[in-house]
Amino acid sequence: MDWVYVGLGLVILLLAGDVLVKGAVNLSLRLGVPALIVSLTIVAFGTSAPELLIAINAVHENAPGIALGNVIGSNTANILLVLGIPAMLAVLHSSECNTRKTYIYMILSSVLFIVVAMMGPITWMHGIVLLSALFFVLGDAFCEARAHRNGNSACDPCAIGDVEDIEGVDPDMPWWRIGIFMVLGLIGLPLGADLLVEGAVSIARHFEIDETVIGLTLVAVGTSLPELATTVMAALRRQADVALGNVIGSNMFNLLAIIGITSFVGVIPVDEQFLRFDLWVMLGASLLLAPFVFLGWNITKQWGIVLTSLYAVYILIVLL
């Protein structure tokens, strides 16, 4: 039954996160909230809601290794797996997308997160530091996007587009459907997170597997499935040139927001395994993107094979 709980919880999380984003986006636009603000806040928080709820539930269930493992493992999977598999299907034209500033922010966020982890356990004071960095990044993105819309900056293929480009937007969506989406999302997310964490913790204890390993593998890959599905579909449609920017933004949000918010729920101890190995793998995987960001290399099929193989090796090392 534990595996059933994990599978059912994951399905509920993915579906609930999707409908919550759709409902929140359309509700905000109906209420007159600018599309720019919706893109920078509601969509970002909505797509990270599964990871956030899992982290909060894991801390409540006294399984903080799952909370940290989910974030660290998801970031590693986003780079090596979520970019690697689509690249094997079609070239990711990262040279067409200027993500240099965001990438630098992601590296700085990774370093800040490692420093915070080394000072662990992570408390609400560390959470304030992480969330302050997030607000700075969001503020800078807001100013840059507003300048772009006003015609004061060079055209950037990765810049935030118009209302029609926002994920989940439907100008014709009736109010009753928006309400149903919001209710289903708000009910489904905590339910799915509870089932997934309960099942994962039981599996770990039954097989005497460290909860950090479950967080780094089973939970991390599961919560990375939405990003993987999105980039695979984009690759098949030959529209994967913005995948790099999406992964960078997602990773940065995971580091600063998920643990930052969760730290207010309870103290998060940092397992020695994270400090010895996994945090450095996450940072190393992030640094692997430097040539694609700064030198304009495209992520070809060959690079996709390399990235995916590296992730397979990492998983084997963690499991063994």
Image: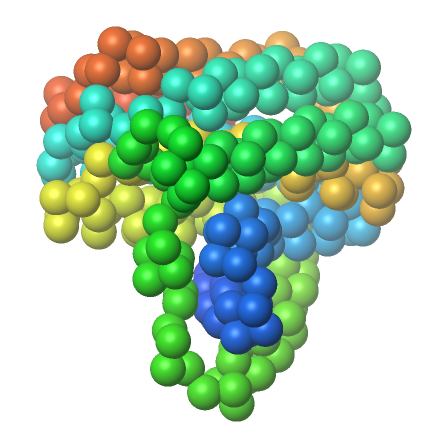
Where is residue 29 drawn, in percent x and y?
Answer: 51, 68
Where is residue 69 drawn, in percent x and y?
Answer: 60, 33
Q: Quadrant of the N terminus?
A: bottom right
Where is residue 258 drawn, in percent x and y?
Answer: 66, 41
The picture quadrant where one finds residue 140 is: top right
> With 157 as the anchor, is 169 left or right in this view?
right
> With 266 as the anchor, is 3 left or right in this view?
left
The front one of 24 and 124 is: 24
The front one of 33 and 93 is: 33
Q: Residue at 75% x, 19% y: name it.
A: 116
The picture quadrant where one finds residue 294 is: top left
Q: Residue furthest front?
A: 151
Q: Residue at 35% x, 49% y: name it.
A: 161
Q: Is residue 98 visible?
A: yes
> With 275 as the anchor, is 152 left or right in this view?
left
> With 84 as the anchor, is 48 left or right in this view?
right
Q: Residue at 52% x, 90% y: name it.
A: 176
**Total numbered labels:** 0
The front one of 66 and 143 is: 143
Where is residue 72 drawn, in percent x and y?
Answer: 56, 29
Q: Is 142 situated above or below 284?
A: below
